[in-house]
Amino acid sequence: MAPDYPGFGHSSAPAASEWSYTFDHLADVIDHLLDSLGRTRYAIYVNDYGAPVGFRLAVRHPDRITGIITQNGNAYEDGLTSFWSDLRKIWSNPSEADLAPLRANLTREATHWQYTDGVPDVSLVNPDKEALDQALLDRPGNEEIQLALFLNYATNVAAYPVWQEYLRTHQPPVLAVWGKNDAIFGPDGATAFTRDVKNAQVHLLDTGHFALETHRPAIAALTRTFLHSLPA
C-alpha cells in the first residue's frame, strides 16, 4: 500500500488556508487510514517526505513496526547537505520576502534536477515521472501547500533526537538503501543508522535522490530479502 498524502498525487488537496499542512497532520491521516484498514503490524518503506511521516508512526506505535526500509529517507543531521542551508535560515525567520528560494524548488527545472542530479546515466530516468510530478505541482493552490510543508520541515529536524531514541530503544530491523550521490540527503544519513541500530543494513548505490528510477531491480531484491527475514 502506497497512499498519496493530502495535497499529493490524486488525493484531495484542500487549500492551505482550509487545512493545516504539517507533518504531524500527514502522519495523523496515515495513522487513521491504517486503523481503518485494521493494520496493526507492518513494515514501512520511507523516502524523502515519507521518512518524517513513517518515523512519527513508529514513535507513536513502536509495537506495530516490524521493519524499516529507508531509501534516501533521512533521520539524522548527518544526512542534511548544503541544499538545506537557505531553508535553515528561512525557518528562523519565515517572512514572505524570504520565500523566493523555496518557490524556486517548485519549478520544472528544479523537478528535473531532483530526478537527474547524481545519476550517471540519465537515460534510465523515465521523463514521464517528472512530467507528472510537475503537472501535479502546478495545480492551482499547490504552491502554497508545498511552501507550508517546506516551512514545517523544521519540525522534522527538531524531532531527529526523538526518532533516534526510538531506534536505540526498540532496535527495529533497518535496511538503508541510498542513492549515494543524493545532493539533498547525503550518504552519511544512511550510515548514521548504524550508530543506533545494531544490525542495520546499509547499501549505497551509484545514483541520486530517486534511486528507484535507475536501480529498481536492485532495490526490489534487497527489499524482498529484507522483508523475508522479518519475524512474522
Image (cartoon, rainbow, N blue to C red):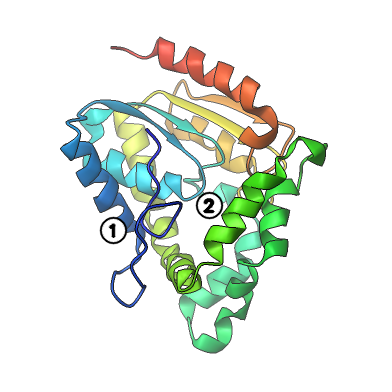
The answer to whether 192 is drawn above or below residue 111 in the figure is: above
Residue neighbourhood size for the residue with mark 2, other residues' Cα within 10 Å, grouped as few (<14), some (14–19), many (≥20): some
Q: Indicate the quadrant where residue 65 lies.
A: top left
Q: Quadrant of the C terminus?
A: top left
Which residue appears at 46% of the width and 20% of the height? 199
Name the residue type under label 1. Answer: His
Q: Secondary structure at mark 1?
A: helix
Q: Quadrant of the N terminus?
A: top left
Q: Position of residue 39 (x, y in %)?
A: 21, 30
Q: CA distance from mark 2 to mark 1?
A: 23 Å
Q: Position of residue 94 (x, y in %)?
A: 48, 81
Q: Is residue 179 visible?
A: no
Work out whether mark 2 precedes mark 1 in sequence or the reverse, and give the earlier one: 1
The answer to whether 77 is drawn above or below residue 196 in the figure is: below
Left or right, 22 with reference to 134? left
Which residue appears at 46% of the width and 51% of the height? 9
The answer to whether 173 is drawn above or below residue 90 in the figure is: above
Q: Secondary structure at mark 2?
A: helix
